[in-house]
Amino acid sequence: MSPKRPENVSSQDWFQQIPQNHATKGRLRPALAEYHSKYTPAQIAAYEQSVAHKKLVRAQQTTERLVHGPKKARNTGPKKPATSWQLFMMDFRASQSDEVKRDMTQVAALASTKWKSMSDADKAPYVKKAERLREQFKIDQAKVQG
């Protein structure tokens, strides 16, 4: 198979070059044969075995996909609860202007600075809500597991 024609070469010129490419291949065949002769039969067998193994694995994967269909998601349980930081970040994002919301890096930097400067009393509502969500998650998870 010939390589793809470059955009800067016209199709007429490209077709004229095809016989030259085949002639070049003919000149290189002895060098290629010499290169291959340097391999021992054991090396050739090992290479052929690895190629055959790769083909076998690929065929098995294809067969599995066809027989069993696409893999299903393993996690069917409840979604993990948000942390106190994530809850704060949701409120903080909602309170920002549309102009600031566009730059997520800036929003994260502002939120981080504010979160670090907040006292434990200011963080308490977020911590309590996160604990409630965590408890509800454990209850939901126990229901799913049976």
Image (cartoon, helix red, strand yellow):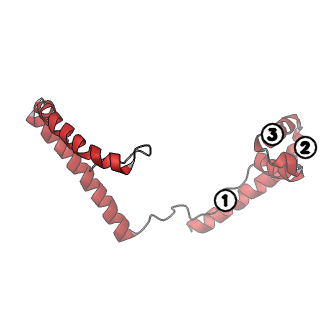
Quarter of the image for residue 29 reads: top left
Residue at the (38%, 69%) spot, across then down: 68
Please name the residue that numbered disc 1 is placed on: 138
Task: Compare marks 1 and 3 and give the one earlier in the sequence.
Answer: 3
The x, y position of residue 71, in whole percent, is 45, 63
Indicate the quadrant containing the C terminus: top left, top right, bottom left or bottom right. bottom right
Which numbered marker is on residue 122? 2
The x, y position of residue 85, in whole percent, is 78, 45
The x, y position of residue 44, in whole percent, is 14, 38
Quarter of the image for residue 23 reads: top left
Q: Residues within 10 Å of mark 3 (few under 14, many from 20)?
A: few
CA distance separating discs 3 and 2: 22 Å
Q: Is residue 84 left or right of residue 120?
A: left
Check if mark 1's residue and mark 3's residue have beta carbons within 8 Å: no
Task: Compare marks 1 and 2 and give the one earlier in the sequence.
Answer: 2
Please name the residue that numbered disc 3 is placed on: 106
The x, y position of residue 88, in whole percent, is 82, 48
Say which element carries label 2: helix
Residue 127 is at least partly visible in this image: no
User: What kind of residue is marked 3?
Assistant: Gln
Residue at the (22%, 45%) spot, across then down: 19
Say which element carries label 3: helix
CA distance separating discs 1 and 3: 34 Å
Nearer to the camera, 106 or 35: 35
